Amino acid sequence: MQNRKRASARMTGMLAAVLLAGSIAANAAYPTWAEGSTYSAGTVVLYNGHDYKALVTHTAYAGAGWNPASTPTLWQDLGVDTGTTPTSAPTATPVPTKAPTAVPTSGPTATPKPTTAPTATPKPTSTPVPTVTPTTPAGGCTAAAWSSTTAYNGGAQVSYNGRTYSAKWWTSGDTPSANTGDGKPWNDLGVCGPTPTPGPATPTPIVTATPKPTATPVPAVTPTPLPGVTPTPTTVPVTSVPVTGLPKHVVEGYWHNFDNGTGTMRLKDVPAEYDIINVSFAEGDPFAPAGTAAFVLDKAFNEADFIADIKAKQAAGKKVQISLGGANGVIVLGNTAARDIFIKTMGDIIAKYGFDGIDIDIENNLSMAAGEDYRNPTTPQIVNLIAATKALKARFGANFMITMAPEVAYVQGGYGVNGGIWGAYLPIIYGLRNELTILHVQLYNTGGITATDEKNYNQGTVDFAVALTDMMLKGFNVNRDPSKPFPALRPDQLSLGLPATSGAAPSGGYLSNAGVQQALDCLMKGSNCAGYKPSAAYPDFRGVMTWSVNWDKSSNYSFAKGHKAYLNQYPN
């Protein structure tokens, strides 16, 4: 996103696993994976008859669905369990190490395909959170007494004022009696028994969080082949159920929580043509522990009015999200402690304002090692961001939206080079492919780039928008390596990200409404293409995103009004 004039103020499987475990656990060489446990890197566990090795230290948060088979970023499949007893039994208790110092990297400078891959600085090993040994409280309560300074993972039980509470997700400092109910971290399990039971009590947690709807299988979206053209078959390993309450085709825009020369405006004044509004931005708080997210409303706005405006937009069927990052925003998740702080602080921001989702627009401090496999990332910042976003999804439920707005170098740039900023978003997109609602790559401020037909396309053209988007619809080989095929996304998971006006993209990439709609014709109908023509039409393509609502205001909202009218011709 465009640089701002001022610094912003402070940023599933379980049932099957249990059934199978019951039949093979007696002969298994390794302990059975258990939800809610913390695993250190290198730990080997049994799950669904296979052995898996933990790639990074992490906690399998209750309700997050992070079983080994579904999280290749966290676990390596070692194959079918042989029943052989290992020389030394692995342990699931992490050993704390010295926390690394995270060194932010500078924002990317968009250039044509580089001739050599940048040399990436080795990344530090994630630091696990030490396990806290609870103390046994007095009275009839058997769970440890709640402590305001202790961090509790999902499933942890405590006693407080004669009652037992169970944590729904990671929490610290939230008094149990004042934080129960929807959107809050504690379940009240009732009054403690009058007589203590020897040994630790293990009552069954009663989860009162908003239940997730039963997943209805979604048929695979089949592109419409163009006459005379045989489309290339691709595998789309996306199994998520799309968020409900969202139009089939959308116009999405970023709303400034600051004045960058376009002036400020109330959220309630954003025109109805915008289906999704991204509030910009939440950032990392540089004066707080690493991972602390902060969102401070500009002094031009009243917080009560702002919250009322969000509710009014939602009542009108719109989605209002919080966007993380921006051109100047930095959030450092270099170890598991920072990750857990982020889960807590960002979750609290979302709950406070009632946001419908999170938009990931990190443009700083994000890079990867040269040749790092996007399917098995090891860079702590990337691994922890994936894990934290999954935890937020688990906390807020199936209809919690996750969108992303990376720059071209971070995504399609991975076709030519694999390392540094080039392709650095690919592991994030891949790791969150089942949670991802929409990806809208910023097709501006980037110069030219080579597509999979080996032609160079320049920003601000129809071919640039179509060719680069087609890469995500078909998939492509990372660094041109056939052993690293990045899989296609569903058409409904993709939108065109473009500036509302030429002034919104000082480094270029503006495309007129007529040009944008020509690109949409080409992608959605297979007609009216320029030089680049996809092998299929994608009528379920989601729509358009713009930076920004405020810039669009300067042209009487021609972007939103023109493109919403265009998208309305397609059935919803």
Image (spheres, grey):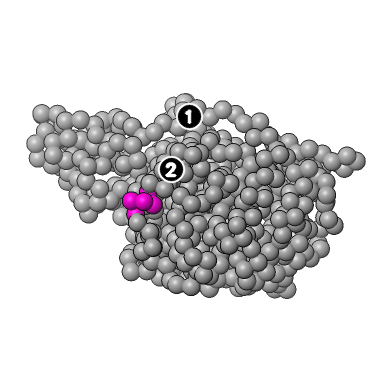
160 is higher (above) or lower (below) than 305: above
The residue segment tinted magenta is 303-307
Between 443 and 236, the residue placed more toward the observer is 443
Q: Is residue 392 visible?
A: no
In percent of width and height, residue 230 lies at 86, 41
Give the quarter of the image for residue 108: bottom right
Amino acid at dot 1: Pro
**Which dot marks residue 189?**
none
In percent of width and height, residue 491 lies at 68, 43
75 is higher (above) or lower (below) than 362: above
Task: Calculate the distance from the C-alpha at mark 2 to the C-alpha at mark 1.
Answer: 25 Å
Q: Which residue is mark 2?
A: 312
Between 204 and 499, the residue placed more toward the observer is 499
Query: Residue at position x 81%, y 62% from top?
Result: 454
Between 84 and 238, the residue placed more toward the observer is 238
Instruction: Report if the CB atoms under discs 2 and 1 are less than 8 Å apart.
Output: no
Find numbered disc 2 in the image and state the secondary structure of the residue it sits on. helix
Magenta stretch prevailing secondary structure: helix
Query: Residue at position x 81%, y 58% from top?
Result: 453
Find numbered disc 1 in the image and state the secondary structure of the residue it sits on. loop
Q: Is residue 501 magenta?
A: no
Q: Is residue 520 left or right of residue 27?
A: right
285 is higher (above) or lower (below) than 57: below
Give the quarter of the image for residue 240: top right
Query: Residue at position x 62%, y 71% from top?
Result: 506
Q: Which residue is mark 1?
A: 213
In percent of width and height, residue 207 lies at 33, 32
